Amino acid sequence: AEPATFDANLDARIVIDDLAAWWIFATAVLGEDSFGKNAYLYKESATAPFRYAPWDFNHSFGQAWETSRTDPLTPIDVGWPIDTNQLWERLLTSPVHGPALRVSYRAALAGPLSVDEVTALFDSMVAEVDAGARKDQALWGEAYANYYPRGDLQDFDGEVAYTRAWIAERWAYLNQP
């Protein structure tokens, strides 16, 4: 659709707040798999607009499924991941939706996606898996290190420290004016 038609009819086709939440979260955590291709789009009825539900974040928070690292300074408006989903390009370049998405992003970073909230949630999750992760590391640590032979692969404590530092650096980047 032409830009004016796209803007005028989008609310009837998509729940904009769902898409905004998807874009904000996926770009904040650099959730490449979810952002570019892995997502559930569904309708609550035949006439309802599409909604979004998250799925597949095995490439996020600075590490992909095969343990490669993702730079926390990766931009959100150009290059990755915008070119993987043309809907984001249309929304971000829209004079109606682009500014609103950016306002929503700032509000999320000041509220539920603040660095303090995200770090607290991360720490809670680390505490939840700590005993099991240490048991797995004792049993499988050598095999894991041999499967992914890289110098920067770390033990549980090292990976926790890496991720915590990645979050701090990513959120500092996202909060730049």
Image: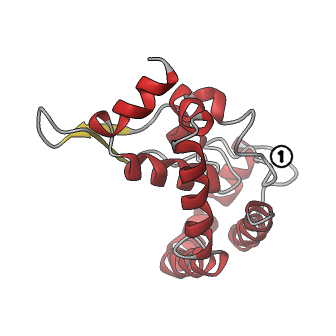
Between 38 and 99, the residue placed more toward the observer is 99
Q: Position of residue 101 (x, y in %)?
A: 55, 51
Which of the 4 quarters of the picture holds residue 116?
Answer: bottom right
Check disc 1: other Cα within 10 Å, few if <14, some if 14-19, many if 20+.
Answer: few
The answer to whether residue 29 shows anywhere in this view is: no
Between 69 and 129, the residue placed more toward the observer is 69
In-image side of 26 versus 176 (left or right): left
Image color mode: secondary structure
In-image side of 45 versus 167 (left or right): left
Count numbered badges in the picture: 1
Would you place residue 23 above or below residue 129 in this image?
A: above
In-image side of 24 versus 152 (left or right): left
Q: Position of residue 145 (x, y in %)?
A: 73, 51
Residue occupying the point 48% across, 18% down: 2
User: Where the N terminus falls, by quadrant?
Assistant: top left
Would you place residue 56 above or below residue 158 in this image?
A: above
Q: Position of residue 18 (x, y in %)?
A: 38, 50
The answer to whether residue 18 shows anywhere in this view is: yes
Residue occupying the point 49% across, 31% down: 37
Q: Which residue of the protein is positioned furthest toward the top in this rendering?
A: 1
Q: Three-letter amino acid code at disc 1? A: Arg
Q: Which residue is mark 1?
A: 150
Q: Secondary structure at mark 1?
A: loop
Would you place residue 111 above or below residue 42 in this image?
A: below
User: Where the C terminus falls, by quadrant?
Assistant: bottom right
Residue occupying the point 60% across, 40% down: 32
Between 47 and 112, the residue placed more toward the observer is 47
